[in-house]
Image: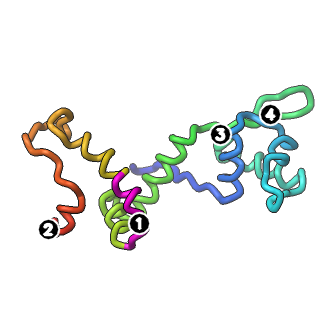
Amino acid sequence: MAGRKTLAITDRQFAALRILWDDGPMTVRELMDHLPRGDRLPYTTVLGLLQNMEKAGLVDHQEEGTTYRYRAALSREKATGTLLQDFLKRFFQGSAAALVLGLVDSRALSRDELREIEGKLIPLTTNDQPDKGKNTGKKAEPISARRRRGS
């Protein structure tokens, strides 16, 4: 999509977002208390992180007296979707199949993960749910069979 702003999230920003998604809006001090022991940062560092995240549109705040309570400005699903779309576009020319096949080829997926993926894909390609509005009358062939045939 031309002109679309890329969502870039650092490890620290992602850690803060994960805490806000899981535990809800927090003050700087509350967020500091939720950070893992090894990631304890000074108050001013966490405040600066949240202020930069707010400028980037990742969080927003609500005033509570003299403190601010920060919350994630976008859902986990929206952030994940945006990041995945950007990743696919930049590294796999927009092809989710290339990504999944790369994971299969590199043996990065366990048998259980492959079964789970296949279980989610098969209902999308059966006669009950036509693929992109067309009912071809064909049932989905397992990924493993297609890979063996080389298609």
For numbered disc 3, what is the local secondary structure?
helix
Up the image or down, 31 lies above or below 151; here it is above
Identify the amino acid type marked 1.
Answer: Phe
Mark 1 Cα within 10 Å, few/some/many (few <14, many 20+)?
few
Q: Residue at x 31, y 47 (%)?
A: 119
Camera-near label (1 vs 3) is: 3
Q: Is residue 111 magenta?
A: yes
Q: Which residue is mark 2?
A: 149
* Circle 4 SS class: strand
Q: Tell me: 89 left or right of 130.
A: right
Between marks 2 and 4, how big is the CA–CA gap? 56 Å
Where does the image place residue 61, in percent across and percent down from the top left? Answer: 75, 34
Q: Amino acid at mark 3?
A: Trp
Would residue 15 appear left or right of 136 to someone viewing this image?
Answer: right
Question: Which is more foreground, mark 3 or mark 4?
Answer: 3
Instruction: Provide the residue span drawn in magenta.
Output: 106-115
Gap between marks 1 and 2, in whole Å?
Answer: 26 Å
Left or right: 70, with 87 as reference point: right
Residue shown at 81%/62% (left/top)? 38
Which residue in the structure is indicated by mark 1? Answer: 91
